[in-house]
């Protein structure tokens, strides 16, 4: 396959994952209560649907689905895990947009959740999605093997919580008012937590679902970490250069807030070079999986992440 065909195949599979995720989220967020739920309050459900449906690239679900597919796992196990991860990602965006955090009006090209509803509802919609994510993974419908489900729950909790995304967000917020700016190493660690941890979970989940060998799990982990770091640098470059309309969220926020990013620390050119190096690291790690051409789609994902325009 040449470069254009590879990129086209990637877009096709990303669209496919996005469509499957949208349909599965739609049905998980239906009005009828599940066993042991009492009722699903209509306005809260509407806000949870607003936050999680009808937008986003669905890159994280794609990564879960495609990394599981490498090991022959398809269907509900991967799709439900993908939905759980996307719920956590969407909750984090809604909470990040709140006045107490980034205070944004625009997300995925639409008013943010607290603008479309109100602050309390936006907070509760995020809380509801976070909790539901663990419900979805723990449900036997995700996998018949309870110990595998526990492994997924544990990995997701570690990625999303104190030592992962939430911790990274706390470090980022603290840095905004700190007397000394974050160093490059501190910035990279904060970003590995805030953004990288969920992306890393996406591919770890594929390895867990697929019963990958320990060496394969390590290679997937290296791929996930490099992809996560490349994703964040690309995000910082887009924020520095980007236009709000293409991004569907406000651009130029990092410089305005004096945020430490690899762009502010290294400059645009060096940040781009670092991003390209990370794509190489990601594709090298894939080669170590020993799965041949099947990993090509994930290599293309790494290239997409670095070159994306939104
Ligand atoms: C509030 C607990 C809590 C955490 C927030 C993820 C996050 C942590 C904040 C979002 C702010 C931000 C712009 C982070 C940079 C990277 C990022 C997560 C971008 C958005 O992800 P995309 O591009 O979004 O995958 P879509 O809309 O395509 O899903």
Image: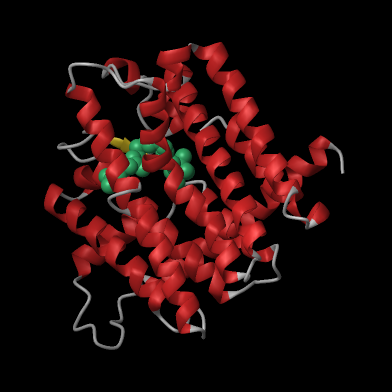
The residue located at (65%, 36%) in the rendering is 281
Q: Position of residue 92 (x, y in %)?
A: 31, 48
Q: Quadrant of residue 127?
A: bottom left
175 and 133: which one is in front? 175
201 and 81: which one is in front? 201
Number of marks in picture: 0
Q: Position of residue 104 (x, y in %)?
A: 25, 33
The residue located at (17%, 23%) in the rendering is 177
| Image position of 154 with respect to 304: above or below | below
| Image position of 20 with respect to 39: above or below | above
Seen as rendered, the residue at the extreme front is: 214
The residue located at (54%, 68%) in the rendering is 79
Q: Is residue 298 visible?
A: yes
The reply, left or right, for residue 189 in relation to residue 282 is left
| Image position of 177 with respect to 302: above or below | above
Q: Is residue 94 visible?
A: no
The reply, left or right, for residue 61 in relation to residue 177 is right
Seen as rendered, the residue at the extreme right is: 1
Picture quarter with the N terminus: top right
92 and 198: which one is in front? 198
Q: Position of residue 72 (x, y in %)?
A: 71, 70
Q: Position of residue 42 (x, y in %)?
A: 21, 69
- The quadrant of the rendered image in which ligand 1 is seen is top left
The reply, left or right, for residue 108 in relation to residue 74 is left
Q: Quadrant of residue 227?
A: top right
């Amino acid at each position: 396959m040449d470069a254009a065909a590879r990129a086209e195949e990637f877009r096709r599979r990303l669209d496919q994952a996005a469509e499957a995720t949208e349909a599965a989220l739609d049905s998980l967020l239906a009005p009828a209560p599940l066993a042991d739920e009492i009722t699903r309050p209509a306005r809260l459900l509407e806000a949870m649907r607003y936050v999680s449906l009808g937008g986003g690239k669905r890159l994280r679900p794609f990564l879960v689905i495609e990394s599981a597919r490498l090991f022959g796992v398809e269907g509900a196990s991967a799709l439900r895990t993908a939905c759980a991860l996307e719920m956590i990602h969407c909750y984090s965006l809604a909470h990040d947009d709140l006045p107490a955090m980034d205070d944004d009006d625009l997300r995925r090209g639409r008013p943010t959740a607290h603008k479309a509803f109100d602050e309390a509802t936006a907070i509760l919609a995020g809380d509801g999605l976070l909790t539901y994510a663990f419900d979805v993974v723990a449900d036997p419908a995700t996998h018949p093997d309870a110990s595998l489900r526990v492994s997924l729950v544990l990995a997701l909790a570690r990625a999303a919580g104190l030592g992962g995304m939430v911790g990274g967000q706390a470090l980022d917020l603290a840095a905004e008012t700190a007397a000394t700016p974050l160093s490059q190493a501190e910035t990279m660690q904060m970003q590995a937590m805030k953004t990288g941890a969920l992306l890393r979970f996406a591919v770890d989940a594929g390895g867990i679902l697929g019963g990958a060998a320990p060496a394969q799990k390590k290679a997937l982990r290296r791929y996930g970490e490099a992809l996560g770091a490349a994703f964040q640098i690309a995000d910082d470059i887009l924020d520095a250069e980007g236009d709000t309309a293409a991004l569907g969220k406000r651009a130029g926020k990092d410089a305005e807030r004096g945020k430490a990013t690899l762009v502010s620390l290294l400059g645009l050119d060096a940040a781009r070079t670092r991003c390209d190096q990370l794509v190489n690291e990601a594709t090298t790690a894939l080669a170590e999986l020993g799965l041949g051409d099947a990993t090509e789609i994930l290599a293309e994902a790494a290239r997409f992440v670095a070159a994306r325009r939104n």
